Image (cartoon, rainbow, N blue to C red):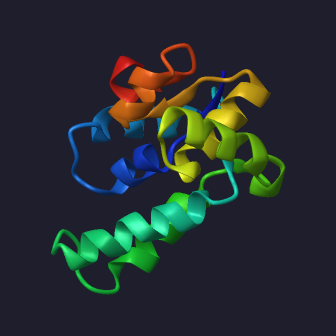
Amino acid sequence: MRYVLDASVAVAWELNESTSAKALALRELAELGVHELLAPDIFPVECAHALTRAERRGLLSTGQAGIILAHILYIDMQFSPSISLIARATEISSRMKLGVYDCLYVVLAMDEQSPLVTSDQKLIIKFPDIAINIMAL
């Protein structure tokens, strides 16, 4: 199965969150080749942002973000150029009152006709035909 992977799920691989067990199970299946993971090319930046924020909040020690980011990016993923998604993402962002970054994932999921796996409740509520809660896998 092909999935568009939200950065929130990848960060849960590394932080102790309520979604971590499900997120890790998805990662294992992707590593075994059962699933193919896709994301817009902003994915590494979003992961880095979340991890450095976790450092500032004291959830990680200073300097751990880079090490953890390398572990996240070690998994084989296909990255799509955000430039090809940005026009539609901007339109959806304006119409749905969501962040453009989130809408890049939505557009990619639409284009690839693949579910968007996320823990972002706003996306799950606003796009029930596209977004799947990681806990539902």
Q: Quadrant of residue 134?
A: top left
Q: Position of residue 66 (x, y in %)?
A: 45, 78
Q: Quadrant of the N terminus?
A: top right
State whether residue 42 appears in this view.
yes
State whether residue 31 appears in this view.
no
Q: Position of residue 68 (x, y in %)?
A: 42, 69
Q: Position of residue 45 (x, y in %)?
A: 55, 67
Residue at point 50%, 62% (across, down) = 46
Residue at point 48%, 42% (across, down) = 98
In this rendering, is residue 5 above or below 15?
Answer: above
Query: Left of 95 or right of it: where is 57?
Result: left
Give the residue at the far right of this rendering.
84
Query: Left of 67 or right of it: where is 73?
Result: right
Residue at point 34%, 56% (across, down) = 14
Give the residue at the far top of this rendering.
129
Q: Quadrant of the C terminus?
A: top left
Q: Nearer the viewer, residue 28 or 46?
A: 46
Query: Left of 4 or right of it: where is 11?
Result: left
Query: Left of 105 or right of it: where is 63?
Result: left
Residue at point 30%, 41% (across, down) = 20
Q: Nearer the viewer, residue 95 or 62?
A: 95
Q: Quadrant of residue 74?
A: bottom right
Q: Nearer the viewer, residue 59 or 40?
A: 40
Give the residue at the far front of this rendering.
95
